[in-house]
Image (cartoon, grey):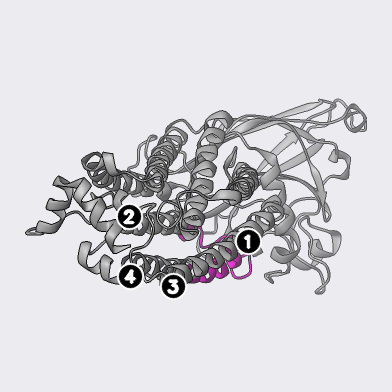
Amino acid sequence: MGGSSFSVQWLPPFLLLTFVSSINASIHLYDHQGFREVGNSYLLSGGSEGIVASPNPSTATSHVHSFIRFENITFSRSKEAADQHSDMGHSTGLIQVVIFEAADRDNIGGSAYGGQRSICCTPDLAKLEGCKHGEVIRIPSATDINWPIVLNVQFSGKSLSASMGDSEVPITKTGMYNLFFISCDPKLKDLVMNGKTLWRNPDGYLPGRMAPLMKFYVYMSLAYVLLCVTWFFQYMRFWKDILQLQHCITAVIALGLFEMVLWYFEFENFNRTGIRPVGITTWVVTVGAVRRTVSRLLILSVSMGYGVVRPTLGGLTSKVLLIGLTYFVATELLDITEYVGTINDVSGRARLFLVLPDAFLDAFLILWIFTSLSKTLEQLQAKRSSVKLDTYRKFSNALAVAVIASVVWIGYEAKVYFKATDPFNERWQSAWIITAFWDILAFGLLCIICYLWAPSQSSQRYAYSEEKGEEFDDEETQSLTRGKPEGDISLTKQDNNPEEDEEEEDKRE
């Protein structure tokens, strides 16, 4: 009875049902939810979340301890099923509420003579294992004989409904917890359920996998604030020399800060109330999709030399906007599926079908970016523009490192999302790193772009003019992104005598 076949055969349907059952909050709502046939049982998934145990369960108050609470749970059966019993019957239908930690998944169900594993006890299993025919097979946990938890709810007589009294199950061990409502009676195959359950961690209603992200977004918001202050100081200092490219960078920084702040407040509201309004989450993921789209278009434009090597993108503008619009739609659909209304700590299979187009567009953009970057480097090398060439080489190296890191991380992420090494989400406490990695990578790449193309008094001078050659670059300035060094007399003189400077440049050309 203790083999792993139950997990392999029955848990994937469990997880799918978990995703479908409730999408309103960590307060899981069940509005006329129907049971489904799985093996020799009929069940309804009540949810799956990582829960952290209370710091000191014996002294914890109701505001800080972890629990799963049942409120207003009611089961309804068909009139045909009720009419098969007499009015005087005490127990005319049994529903069992099963709560188990992922590590104890093999403690639910069993098999006779090594055959197909069953959730409900059969006559053969009743003889072999001593379970009660018509009830869920439960094996006490090796660490706590009271787990898994099984609560019974019974119909009486010909009643069409049965209610479960409000109750609370304290969580004293950190783990991934699963809740199922199960009936082993074929007469109850048309069961429907109403009510709600509340899942709470010591710090609030956020599911365990999501909880660390709230603190993460605080740190990311502070990082963006620091970048904003640094960038806008330079931006205002040299606002007369600002390039179009630097306007785009400013927009990406502002969008990034806005997104991180919105994510924090969305998580804070979810943690405090247990409710995740669809409208608010949709707004947050839309801002994120816009930020990611604009960021990729910025990198593509930089790679094409926009604002530094060429004044406009010319005929490529429409193509760039088209790929941007397509990427935004794909990202928006993916994020809505993944985040809007999501409560449970199990990712839906629907995500797979939306990941593929998003990944294809990312691969296409990467190919286009590096192709454009290669052409830009060749152009700069041919014109002997040493300063710009050095800047673009640094940018290409940073981009290459980011792509390599992304490919390595995608391999790790695929194992998690497609359950290759963790099919039962037992590593849920570190799952937040998957989301955090992409935000950190995007922020790091943005910082590099900000460093390489920071506003300076020399930005506009060399933005759209023809290249003067390596000798001119070395003599006139040391960087596109740095201001006047101390003791540099030549730049001061040029600023004070623009006509003389222009005449001198014509002579050099």
Distance between the alpha carbons at the discs numbered 4 and 2? 12 Å
Estimate the x, y position of residue 338 in percent, counting from the top left: 60, 46
Residue 480 seen in this snapshot: no
- For the record, the magenta segment spans 404-431
- Which residue is disc 2 drawn over? 462
Q: Residue 395 versus residue 497: which sits nearer the camera?
A: 497
Q: Amino acid at mark 1?
A: Phe
Q: Residue 445 versus residue 97: which sits nearer the camera?
A: 445
Q: Are marks 1 and 2 in contact (CB under 8 Å)?
A: no
Q: Is residue 406 magenta?
A: yes
The local crowd at label 4, few if under 14, some if 14 to 19, many if 20 or more residues have their Cα within 10 Å, is: many
Q: Which is nearer the N-term, disc 4 or disc 2?
A: 4
Q: Which is nearer the N-term, disc 1 or disc 4?
A: 1
Q: Residue 391 versus residue 183: which sits nearer the camera?
A: 391
Distance between the alpha carbons at the discs numbered 1 and 2? 31 Å
Disc sitting over residue 364 in the figure: 1
Disc sitting over residue 386 in the figure: 4
Disc sitting over residue 382 in the figure: 3
Distance between the alpha carbons at the discs numbered 3 and 1? 27 Å
Above or below, 147 relative to 61? below
Could you tell me which secondary element the residue under label 4 belongs to? Answer: helix
Could you tell me which secondary element the residue under label 3 belongs to? Answer: helix
| Residue at 26% from the left image edge and 46% from the top image edge | 226
Q: Which is nearer the N-term, disc 3 or disc 1?
A: 1
